Amino acid sequence: MINFIKKTSLFAFIIIIFIGTCELLIRNNKDNMYSYKHNYIIENGNNINSLIFGSSHGFFGVMPKYLNQPAFNLANDSQPIRMDYGLLQGYMKYFDNLETVIITISYGSLRGSGWRTEKSAIHKVKYSLYMDANIDNKFIYNFAISSTKFFPGALKSCFRPNKELRCDSLGWGTSYHIDNKRTEWEGDISEAAIKRHTHSHTEYLSANINCLENMIALCKENNIRPIIITAPTWHSYYDNLDKTQYDEMLDVVNNLQNKYNIEYYNFIKDSRFEADDFYDGDHLSNIGAGKFTKILADTLGI
Amino acid sequence: MLFNSIEFLLFLPIVFILYWFVFNRSVKLQNAFVVVVSYIFYGWWDWRFLILIAFTSACSFYSSLLIQKVNSTPPHKNYAKLYAAANIIINLIILGIFKYFNFFSENFDILFRSFGIELNWLTLDVLLPVGISFYTFQALSYTIDVYKGSIKPTNSIIDLFAYISFFPQLVAGPIERATNLLPQFYKTREFDYAKAVDGCRQILWGFFKKMIIADRCAIEVNRIWDTYPEQSGFTLLCGAIFFTFQIYGDFSGYSDIAIGTARLFGINLMRNFNFPYFSRDIAEFWRKWHISLTTWFRDYIYIPLGGSRFGKSKAFRNTLIIFLVSGFWHGANWTFIAWGAYHALLFLPLMLIGSNRKNRDVVAAGRILPSVKELFQMSVTFFFVVIGWIIFRANNITEAWNYICGIFNPSLFDISKPTSKGNIILIILFVLVEWLQRNKQHALQLPNKHIFKYSIIRYLIYFAITISTIVLRGQQSDFIYFQF
């Protein structure tokens, strides 16, 4: 019996050491966008006047370098309002001069799950490990090993030299360059995006609205100007949206405008944007992002 | 509590230590401890489920004592049947309410509506207790065995509670027979090093099957199934094959973990899977798939119905009943009944030509490769099993039919849209390992020869499997058979 316990304990110990080493490697691998953004906020938070939040539409669509005041893009692929709020809350102590918060709301933002399902563990672990934002307050999300999708890739990336950050020095997403645009951007890709963003149920709607309201309230408490925007999309996308879901988004934002006296700018069907401004049906390319940010700077006066 | 959870990872060593070092002084203490930890394990899902299992166990205990009492007093002997029947009916009513009530209610509603009669029967909004079919069948096994006189009823309620709730096999089997498991609770268990080590190996292989094979296949299966009308025939075929391995990895993985865990506690559970995808005909498949359920139906339904003793037509009828009941046991849906009927259709012709008892040996015994004939037989059987799993996995009969039709069209040969290559490679490797180990109890029973005689090699294999299971595992999910 003692022999059995000794052997199994030794076996388990070696496995724990191996996993622990991997965990340490992953945690200390700071060559990723999350760590970069985290460190940037800690080091430069005091100088930032404007912050951009939202999903890929804000991440690829707003280039802080074209705004007239120091700004930083804290949006990311699929990032829900819930995480926007979590990040703003967590980093608030670093912002002494923050004046404006731009919240990008997209067609699918309000009905989306907001990473409340198990499938989103991969995202939650990344934010928790590298940005100290454990929005679910779940102990296991503090460990890379808890995400089956994240762990192997993250481990591999520890041994990969010259990793790309996927964002520029001010946090804007660099992946959607016009040169990489795919031929079917107007057709299949737009169609798939609409399908992904259209939700038949409203299970998460009120929780998402609640997060948005909390975020606005947090801004107001700290004398920050919250602005809601909706980024431009191509007609192959906006012509095929589900009308009920789209109108619902407009209603929600209009109610918030009235309730909190905030600004909302909807560019979803803005005709100033041409085919080259888009990477696909619902994302701006690097050309479009520059153009959009300049329009935004003029419109918002920032 | 799920086997593939952090909770179980902590639960198992604590229970193991307490079982062997604190509660090993007497058999009573050991059994009482088994009951307590089994109830903690089961109550982890929902404590209310404990009321049901305790009620089922108590009914079985007292009815069996009554059966024994009337059996020993000749004038009242006929009451034995009554007590046995009462307990069986009570258990089946509980099972029926929780598992089948809504099915019958909805189907009667549809039937009567087709005659223009509105019934508006109620449906119950109740949670299906995890593993209810498994422990109910185990409880029934005890009552029937006591009634038949195959086993004496136990006078200790703790022993019976331990038998019905023994945590490794409580929620997904193997469905134990009272004659095998209950007597093991009568004597103090002795720790057996070799048995425990082999149990650990079996647990490891079970986790590999569940977390690597089943959980990784599940991702692809769900993706393909959710969008099946848009998929090519080739992708649909891959989806069906992935599900074939998902359900095998999931269920046999659970059984391996259960059997291995039980061995750590000095308990031997019956074998539940015997490499079923290496079967040469459907009859062999059913001797190797979910053995504990198949033999349960054989012992408690097929044989009491007359088995094959009263001519071929009765044997056919009894076999058909077994397959339909077996399908229905899996769930309250017509797809499961259709799945049972489909397998009956494949099985009955074998009975007709009298070849359902062939192929009882290990395929290609003593050889590395199968013969061309064996390979052909296994491929054909595998193909029919895959089609069966489509019916099993579908939400309704129409979906199953559409899925099958979707496979058999020209796009079946369109391999331009590759499906998950990683999974295909993994499955090929898995099949290879299982093939090489097909004459063993489980794939990690390595021979003590060739390179495997060096313990360093064996340990390297165990480390590689453990680490790949942790690192490459799919998304954590419940075991499929919990819902049954």
Image: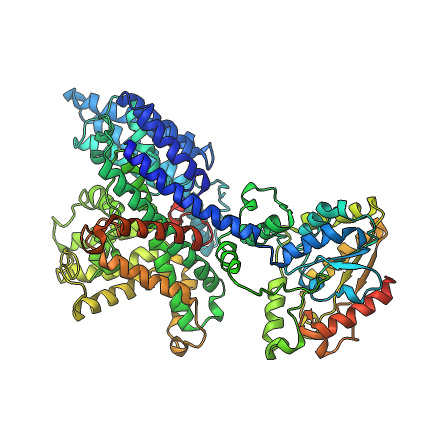
Seen in the image, is A127 located left or right of residue B458? right
The residue lying toward the viewer, choosing from A71 and B272, is A71
Residue B111 position (above or below residue A179): above
- x and y percentages locating residue B68 in the rendered image: 20, 24
Q: Name which quarter of the figure residue B275 lies in.
A: bottom left
- x and y percentages locating residue A86 in the rendered image: 69, 47
The residue lying toward the viewer, choosing from A63 and B284, is A63
- x and y percentages locating residue B375 in the rendered image: 21, 68
- x and y percentages locating residue A94 in the rendered image: 76, 47
The residue at the far right in this view is A301
The residue located at (22%, 48%) in the rendering is B441
The residue lying toward the viewer, choosing from B127 and A16, is A16
Seen in the image, is B287 located left or right of residue A83? left
The residue located at (25%, 35%) in the rendering is B267
Can you see residue B329? Answer: no
The residue located at (45%, 45%) in the rendering is B102
